[in-house]
Image (cartoon, rainbow, N blue to C red):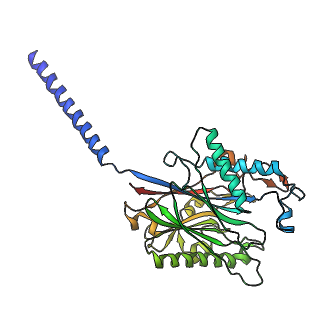
Amino acid sequence: MIKRIFSIAVAALMAATAWAATGDQKQDENRGRRQYQVFGVGFYNLENLFDTINANGSYDLEFSPQGARQWHGKKYWSKINNLARCIAEMSTPTTPNGPAFLGVSEIENRAVLADLVRAVDNRLRAQGKKPWNLQIVHHDSPDRRGVDVAALYNPRQFRLHSVNHHTLELGEMQRPTRDQTVVTGIMGGDTVSVIVNHWPSRIGGQERSSWLREGAAALSKHIADSLWTIRPNEGVIIMGDLNDDPQDKSCAQVLGAVKNPAGVKPHGFYNPFWSLLDKGIGTLAYRGSWNLFDQIIVSGTLLKDNTGANGLHYQKAQVNNFQFLRNEDGSPHRTFSAGVFLDGYSDHFPTEIFLIKAR
């Protein structure tokens, strides 16, 4: 009996020692666990975010109370609030304050962005959250229809350094298109430049208009190369509605953005949205099939193999196809269809990538 009691005591002591050792090990692991900052970088085509004032003659008449769409204040503010809902939902457990940077396209002017930013903050306040106080980068481009690219950024996560604009020269026979806006700032202590794009459309057919987007891709690549002559280790992000898919010539050949990140050189490009499209995930639907025009392409200087664990580097990508943005068939719930007001959001889903940096 004494022997049995002794055996039980020894077993209990061994179990306690093992538990204590395991606890110490977990404490050591917790002490050694690295903490990271996570930054969201997104893009959203806002689909004709025009105000109600006709400031551009026949090109702007459509989006005015007297135009074909009868674009009056009630419709305008409904769209503003719908878009604000979407942007306010672009937060995750690791990015509770939303994206650090959000490129946008198809906006008419700075005023509509100011209305949108206020609507986002009002929605956050209504949810009991702190406002993000997003800041605006905007430039009036030569686009004949009057739509521009722009950017919103959270000053607590992205410290603005400089802004530059580059005009795409298409020749005298082609109408002017959107400028490419380059926004450079500090994110997680590292310098990052984001080139915000809205490449020429496929009017006239994809093949006949491909050379226009190839020219736009060449301009983006030239901009990136110019940035690297000043800061060779700088992270460069090319984003926008490219009006081409990842495998098309403009992206895959001219820009050289590849599907697999392995082996990408520091001044090369990786397109994380290529594999998403291969899985049937897109950002806009046309005649029952998906396209993924809204891409965020990262330079090799933002890949972990080149930066190491300490540098700001790419983590993952996603299409933010929230349920409330979708129709029953899964396509985007847009503002108009065949001239009928649908009180939706956009004909594109927003996209987002996440960058991480060790603290």
Quarter of the rendering containing residue 286 = bottom right
Name the residue at 72% across, 55% down.
Answer: 346
Name the residue at 63% across, 67% down.
Answer: 245
89 sits to left or right of 20: right
View extreme (top): residue:
1
Residue 71 image position (x, y, % from top left): 84, 55
Q: Nearer the viewer, residue 343 or 148?
A: 148
Name the residue at 51% across, 65% down.
Answer: 185
Name the residue at 70% across, 66% down.
Answer: 148
204 sits to left or right of 14: right
Q: Is residue 260 visible?
A: no
View extreme (right): residue:
66
Q: Nearer the viewer, residue 107 or 115?
A: 115
Residue 223 image position (x, y, % from top left): 56, 76
Q: Which quadrant would the C terminus be assigned to in this image?
A: bottom left
Residue 53 image position (x, y, % from top left): 82, 59
306 is higher (above) or lower (below) than 46: below
103 is higher (above) or lower (below) than 223: above
View extreme (bottom): residue:
172
335 sits to left or right of 126: right
Residue 96 image position (x, y, % from top left): 52, 46
253 is higher (above) or lower (below) than 273: below
Q: How many marks?
A: 0
8 sits to left or right of 199: left
Q: Which quadrant would the N terminus be assigned to in this image?
A: top left
Q: Is residue 151 visible?
A: yes
